[in-house]
Image: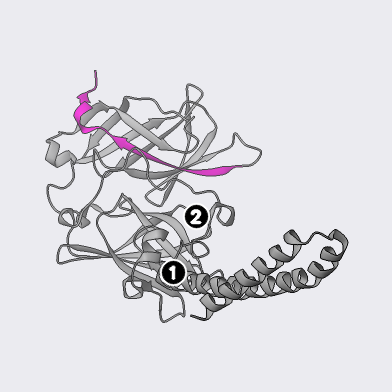
């Protein structure tokens, strides 16, 4: 009602101004007479326009405010670390890996290794517990920079409930530990880690490996061994797959295999003489140079099973230990000629 009266008053004033300015015959006199009302009309119109404009603006502001309160959060920006805040990710799986599940292992607790995609997410040691058909790992961290981990991506972690996060637990030494279930060893696991300092989720990949497990950790029939393959003592050959390092290193394949007293040994011959020693199952083995190539002989537990090894190269400016893995193909085992 108030708005209608104001608009009516403005209309009357405008009509009066037009009549005064357009109907008089004495031009100079009419201009003088019209000046005052026109100015008043302009001021009045401006004032009312301001009031109306103010009211409309106020309504729009109210509408926007209501819209904002009903709009969902725009994004997860600021909750997840971007690429500029992370170091280059490293591969945690290789071509020689195949999943080792709980049904392949005997119940018990074992020390295992874990590979991390980030040097900033350092894990000092890992304990594996096999029980009731589940694999449970406990990671002991090399620092105290992370408050939670989540088995999934950072986006999934942000969307999840806090009760789904895995908090750290201090062990008897005051170290931070994280305990959670996994589906398999020798398989990539996506993991998000929440930084205490940055208050952001960081994208990580982990792989808990079976390389340190002894034969008695595996259920009978889970591994392809000399016994399960029915191999008598003697000399054989088998194809060998090498993975790891820069991808440029090579080994002779097929390789020489010997079965002695029911145990299998392989002679691994590299494509150069630049390797002075290898570490296999914690044992250091010095090289033998054969045909100008570094050659190593050592026992292995099973065929078709990833064996993690370290080879020290002297080809660089200083000696450097490089992690590799080998896998000996059971389907290619033949008696040596």
Of the pair 57 and 3, the residue shown nearer to us: 3
Q: Give the residue number, with chain letter if any, for mark 2.
A: 118
Mark in front: 1 vs 2: 1
Task: Tell me where the magenta segment starts and ends, as one range.
Answer: 319-337
Label annotation for residue 77: none
Q: Give the residue number, with chain letter if any, for mark 1.
A: 67
Magenta stretch contains residue 275: no
| Residue 254 falls in image quadrant | top left
* Residue 202: image location, x then y, percent: 48, 60
* Residue 23: image location, x then y, percent: 73, 60
Of the pair 70 and 21, the residue shown nearer to us: 21
Q: Does residue 231 lie above or below 190 as drawn? A: above
Could you give the CA–CA distance between mark 1 and mark 2, rounded to whole angstroms? 42 Å
Q: Residue at x 82, y 70 (%)?
A: 33
* Residue 111: image location, x then y, percent: 33, 62
Q: Which residue is drawn at 72% across and 69% down?
A: 42
The quadrant of the rendering that contains the C terminus is top left
Asked if residue 122 can be seen in this view, the reply is: no
Crowding at dot 1, Cα within 10 Å, few <14 / some 14-19 / many 20+, comes out as few
């Amino acid at each position: 009602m108030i708005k209608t009266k104001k608009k009516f008053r403005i209309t009357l004033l405008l009509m009066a101004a037009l009549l005064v300015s357009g109907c008089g015959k004495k031009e100079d006199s009419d201009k003088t007479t019209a000046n005052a009302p026109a100015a008043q009309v302009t001021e009045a119109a401006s004032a009312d326009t301001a009031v109306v404009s103010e009211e409309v603006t106020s309504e729009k502001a109210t509408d926007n405010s209501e819209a904002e309160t009903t709009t969902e959060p725009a994004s997860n920006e600021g909750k997840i670390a971007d690429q500029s805040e992370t170091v280059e990710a490293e591969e945690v799986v290789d071509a020689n890996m195949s999943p080792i599940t709980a049904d392949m292992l005997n119940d018990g607790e074992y020390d295992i290794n874990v590979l991390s995609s980030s040097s900033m997410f350092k894990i000092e040691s890992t304990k594996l517990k096999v029980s009731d058909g589940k694999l449970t790992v406990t990671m002991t961290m090399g620092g105290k920079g992370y408050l939670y981990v989540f088995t999934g991506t950072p986006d999934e972690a942000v969307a999840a409930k806090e009760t789904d996060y895995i908090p750290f637990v201090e062990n008897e030494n005051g170290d931070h530990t994280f305990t959670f279930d996994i589906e398999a060893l020798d398989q990539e696991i996506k993991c998000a880690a929440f930084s205490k300092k940055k208050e952001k989720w960081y994208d990580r990949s982990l792989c808990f490996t079976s390389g340190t497990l002894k034969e008695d950790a595996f259920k009978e029939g889970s591994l392809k061994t000399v016994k399960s393959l029915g191999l008598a003592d003697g000399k054989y050959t088998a194809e060998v797959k090498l993975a790891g390092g820069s991808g440029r290193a090579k080994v002779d394949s097929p390789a020489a295999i010997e079965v002695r007293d029911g145990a299998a040994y392989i002679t691994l011959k590299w494509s150069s003489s630049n390797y002075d020693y290898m570490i296999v199952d914690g044992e250091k083995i010095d090289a033998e140079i054969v045909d100008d190539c570094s050659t190593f002989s050592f026992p292995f537990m099973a065929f078709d099973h990833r064996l993690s090894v370290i080879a020290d190269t002297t080809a660089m400016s200083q000696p450097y230990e490089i992690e590799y893995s080998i896998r000996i193909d059971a389907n290619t085992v033949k008696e040596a000629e």
